[in-house]
Image (cartoon, grey):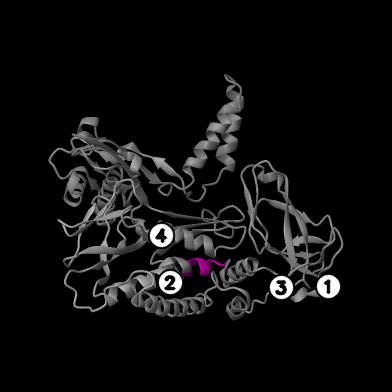
Amino acid sequence: MNPATATLIDRPYPEVVDDILTAVTGGVVKEPIIFDVKEDLYALSRPASGLRSIVGTLKGQHYTFQNSVDYLFSEGDNAVVWQPHATQPDDETTFYVNYFVPNSLSPLTDINVGSVTRTLSEAAGREIATVYQEINAAYLSGFIDTATGQSLDFVVSILNVVRKTKDFAIGLVTFFRDAAASDGNVTIPEGTLLSTAKGEAAFVTTEERTLQRGQPRIDIPVRADVPFKGPVGVVPAGAIVTLEQPVTGIASITNFDATVLGTSDESDDDLRARAKAVLQGLDKATLAALARTVFEERAKLTEVWDPNGSPGKSSDPGTVVLLVQATPERFQSLQSAVNETRAAGVLSSVVAKYVFFKPRMVVTIAAGLTAAGKTKVVTEIIAALQQYCDGLSAGQPVKGADMIKAIAQDVKEASAPGSIRVVDVMAWHADVANPGAQNFVDLLLQAVQSVPFGNADALRTALTSVVTDAAPGPPSERRIADRSLVQGPGGQQATDQEIETGMFQVSATVSGEAWTIALDCEPADILLAEK
């Protein structure tokens, strides 16, 4: 379910009545118009004698705008005029206009409060709105995020999930940090399975909790698992000691107090969360599942580094690294899908052969554009850059002149010759060309810094230890700055003048291989200057 379907049949009573009154007097009902934040006047399709109402979208929600406050009717233009500094629809959304037309043939004209037409319309509108609400409630009861009570019980029963009643024992379990993982946060997911030493009872965590950096322990509420309903879930202090699925960074667990039978049934929110955890846990924690996820996201899995891999293809325990081939626009959703598929406590990294580049530019526009209009112009510039980059194949470089041309063609405010000036271009490549090289360099730097200055023998020993013990590592998700990828016409590193005039390119070839260009541009990278 998404916001569009959630509001598909959500029709409030005042809106239904307003539509009926407009229709019976011969007016136009729900004329759709697309809102553009850079415009404030919108002509109507038919001659109008006045506006009745406007509804649309505000901050993603259905909203009724106020006549004479948010908008006015311009009789000379036969148009809706949105007022500055008033409430306006979300940009690029559709608003709907009800309006009256002159010389209507309808015999019904009196729609004032208390009139027969108004009274009958309100009576009919109430019944229609009630039916809408009943249909909407039935519709929402079919989704796990919106169903409640018994309807939610029916929805989760598809996964063989049953609401836990107060007959299931509850308690607190303390998780202790592993001394070897003193830095960084450790997240214990909701639904983590725990048990007693001999498996007499099993429990699951009912909340996601994060052990913050430097924090040695954390308490997490638990509830007895489904097969351990009733007194069997009541265990003494110190009985819960086993993590069924290891969590990286956690050394041990225990319960300092005995568990007790619950005081209330499992809430709707807790039941939803547990059902989602069950769904996400189906066929997870395997490389085959991760590979299938990559395939379903229309990407290709090239290489895998995991703890059981062959020499040179292994990763640290509790981690897995996937090298994929995917278009940059799909990469973020691919990362999210892999993270949802991975087993709890396993750190997954998804990397690809990308050359990232960040252009910084000054764009001169005509004076007078509103703040919201300027924000939209910046968004359109970034969208034009993204569309240009999406059209490049692997190994094809970004050319400064083509990049400027793409912006000028798609953004009318930046179409004047010389209005776009590139002031800087930054480039990085993913840590894939020489996996682990950056980590190896870091270890060498640490070794040098740990040895007293001038002690050559100690320095030699420290460096020898790093070179001997440090095996090549897997790729990481970090980026490595590489200014040499920003090249001038002769293939050399581009000068500031070549960048400013657009006589440059960002190479997509790394170590002789064809990589893919990925745009990294934010609104702060685009400066608008008025002329």
Closer to viewer: mark 3 or mark 1? 3
**Residue marked by disc 4:** 60
Q: Callout 4, which amino acid? A: Gly
Q: Callout 1, which amino acid? A: Val
| Secondary element type, mark 1 | helix
| Secondary element type, mark 3 | loop
| Secondary element type, mark 2 | helix
**Residue marked by disc 3:** 164
CA neighbours of label 4 inside 10 A, class few (<14), some (14 to 19), many (20+): few
Magenta segment includes 473:
no
Q: Callout 3, which amino acid? A: Lys
* Residue 363 at x, y percent in the picture: 23, 39
Magenta segment includes 289:
yes
Closer to viewer: mark 2 or mark 3? 2
Left or right? Give the position of 339 relative to 213: left
Count the marks. Answer: 4
- State the residue in front, 515 or 281: 281
Q: Kindly tell me whether residue 515 is visible in this rendering.
A: no
**Residue marked by disc 2:** 13
Magenta-tinted stretch: 286-292
Dominant secondary structure of the residues highlighted in magenta in the image:
helix
